[in-house]
Image (cartoon, coloured by chain):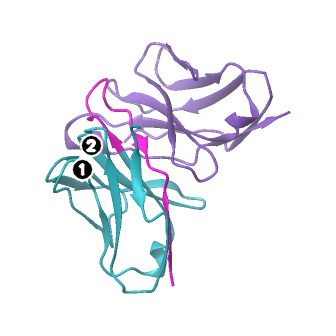
Amino acid sequence: DAKTTQPPSMDCAEGRAANLPCNHSTISGNEYVYWYRQIHSQGPQYIIHGLKNNETNEMASLIITEDRKSSTLILPHATLRDTAVYYCIVRPAGGTSYGKLTFGQGTILTVHP
Amino acid sequence: EAQVTQNPRYLITVTGKKLTVTCSQNMNHEYMSWYRQDPGLGLRQIYYSMNVEVTDKGDVPEGYKVSRKEKRNFPLILESPSPNQTSLYFCASSLSVYRGRETQYFGPGTRLLVL
């Protein structure tokens, strides 16, 4: 499985954009990049995912580099409620391993007033 | 409301006493999975199920059993719980694992303490 590397923690001022990086240099060509977040021991919440094109939804934007070795999750206007642990996950490709998701340590994002 | 439910939410038990944590989803999802979360270790997958009667091991399956007799339910069974299974457990489901339908939705969690 492709591994991901994220900074352990980041800070952001309320109202500013939060840019969370993720390195996945061993990603395979048909593997997706997923982002989830977890707010204080609640169940993880899906944010966004992408393959090679940039993606945007009502929660965030996902920018994937052209070589697909890294990506950035962007929360355009962070609020205090965005304080959470953010997980970058690479979904394995093919066969029955499709179901296996491996969560790393994630990035603790703290949004300050 | 579309959701994944888990019961119980909190459980204190003793070593060796068999227990079952139930997981149910009302979204007609094919794929279901169990994770445990421990401080400093993040979330780790225990077992998953691609569909009814199809299950497979995740990263940390030792000491756990699962069954998938019907689509909506995916119980996690601890035949002989031990203190190292004290953890926060999450159930998750997704429509399938194929392109466009693989987003996983998580339950609220079950906090287990084994004495």
> Mark 1 to mark 2: distance in Å?
6 Å
Q: Is residue B15 above or below residue B46?
A: below
Residue at the (33%, 32%) spot, across then down = B102
Query: Which quadrant of the structure image shows residue A52?
Result: top left
Residue A88 within the magenta-colored segment of the rendering: no
Q: Amino acid at mark 2?
A: Tyr
Residue B99 within the magenta-colored segment of the rendering: yes
Q: Relative to the observer, which residue lies in front, B72 or A41? A: B72
Q: Residue B108's spot in the image, x, y percent?
A: 49, 52
Pick the quarter of the image with the C terminus of chain A: top right
Q: Residue A37's spot in the image, x, y percent?
A: 57, 39
Residue at the (70%, 39%) spot, across then down = A83
Q: Earlier in the sequence, mark 1 or mark 2?
A: 2
Q: Residue A64's spot in the image, x, y percent?
A: 51, 19
Q: Chain of mark 2?
A: B
Mark 1 surroundings within 10 Å by alpha-carbon count, few (fewer than 14), some (14 through 19), many (20 or more): many
Q: Is residue A36 left or right of residue B23?
A: right
Q: Residue B12's spot in the image, x, y percent?
A: 50, 78
Quick check: do tags 1 and 2 share a chain? yes
Disc 1, disc 2: CB below 8 Å? Answer: yes
Instruction: Report the residue that reaches farthest toward the left.
Output: B53
Q: Which residues are magenta?
A: B93-115
Q: Amino acid at mark 1?
A: Ser
Label 2: state its secondary structure.
strand
Specify the chain shown as cyan: B
Specify the chain shown as purple: A
- Total number of numbered discs in the rendering: 2
Q: Which mark is residue A9?
A: none
Pick the quarter of the image with the N terminus of chain A: top left
Q: What residue did someone put label 2 on?
A: B31
Q: What residue did someone put label 1 on?
A: B49
Q: Is residue A93 above or below residue B77?
A: above
